[in-house]
Amino acid sequence: MQAGAELLGVRSAAADAESVIVLCDCLAALGLSDFRVALGTVAFYTALVDSLGLDDDREKFLEALADRDYPLLESIAGNAGVDQAALKVLWRTLELSGTRDALSQVRKMASSAAMDDAIRHLVSVRDLVEDAGFEDAVTLDFGLYQDLTYYSGVIFEAYASGVGLPIASGGRYDGLVGRFEWDISGVGFAIAVNRLHEALEEAGAVPSGSPACIAFAGGLDEPARAMELRRAGWAVAALPDDAPAPPLPRLHRSGGSYVLEPADGEPVSGSWRDILRALGIA
């Protein structure tokens, strides 16, 4: 069984980061204090494979890469006459761990604008997740790769002590929903409920109930603000600034002020501190 979230219709680093932040916030709220989230990017690998000049063998190569079928990869590359130096870049990238040095190395190995863009996007997502307060939980891992025919950009996996497999995984899957006749971008994650249960038992954590959810229009661009509310005990759905009016309670900007519209009672307008006071935070 799985539990997760999807964010459809927004294609940006902020949207990718929000998916990771929500995952981190869920795990933290459940009482897991030592979880880790590894961030990778499928876009870098697809751009790297495109640089190999495989033509008709491209999809077969991507499928073999997703399956970790290295003998088949070698066979496809050999039959296609792939440059061995370029192939070595792929092998070396797959071995990189989630360290700052790994980021430096992979930047040096990027040989196309698409590869550079994938790295910059991934770093932007990492920075936004760190800004939301999870700098100790998130790492970059260029050795992380999942189904390359499913995911199209940032991917991530979450781990916890006492559980040998990822307790959650996700990423960007632009193009997937289009297979079902709805051409819309998407990013999301799924938590493996049985593995999460193992992690909670290992940590001795007891989950608590969830509060009403505040729809925060513009929250995607203000992850630190959204996290401040979450850390105070409020559930927050961070939305694009131009999102259609969601159900109450909701929070948005109007000119230079924030406006809080509660489920009952009068709206509150003013500074961020005014909103915090209205919510009983400050």
Image (spheres, helix red, strand yellow):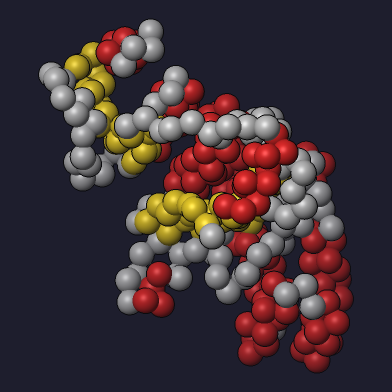
Q: Residue at x 63, y 32 (%)?
A: 205
Indicate the position of residue 166 as horizontal and vertical percent values: 69, 53
Q: Nearer the viewer, residue 16 or 262?
A: 262
* Quadrant placement of the C terminus: top left
Is 185 located above or below residue 161 in the figure?
Answer: below
Q: Residue extending furthest left?
A: 266
* Side (left or right) of 189 relative to 6: right
Asked if residue 134 lies left or right of residue 277, the reply is right
Residue in front for this viewpoint, 264 or 41? 264
- x, y (%) of residue 167? 65, 50
Identify the residue at image location x=52%, y=57%.
2
Q: Is residue 261 visible?
A: no
Please, is residue 65 above or below residue 246 in the view?
below
Q: How many marks?
A: 0
The answer to which image quadrant residue 75 occupies is: bottom right
Residue 55 in the image, given as x and y percentages of width and height = 64, 86
Instruction: Name the residue: 41% across, 33% down.
Output: 210
Q: Quadrant of residue 270?
A: top left
Q: Considering depth in this image, is 4 or 39 the residue closer to the camera?
A: 4
- The quarter of the picture where the N terminus appears is bottom right
Vertical comparison of 25 with 113: above or below: above
Dividing the picture into quadrants, the one containing residue 67 is: bottom right
Q: Residue at horizontal 67%, vertical 85%?
A: 60
Instruction: Let me know if residue 60 appears in the view.
Output: yes
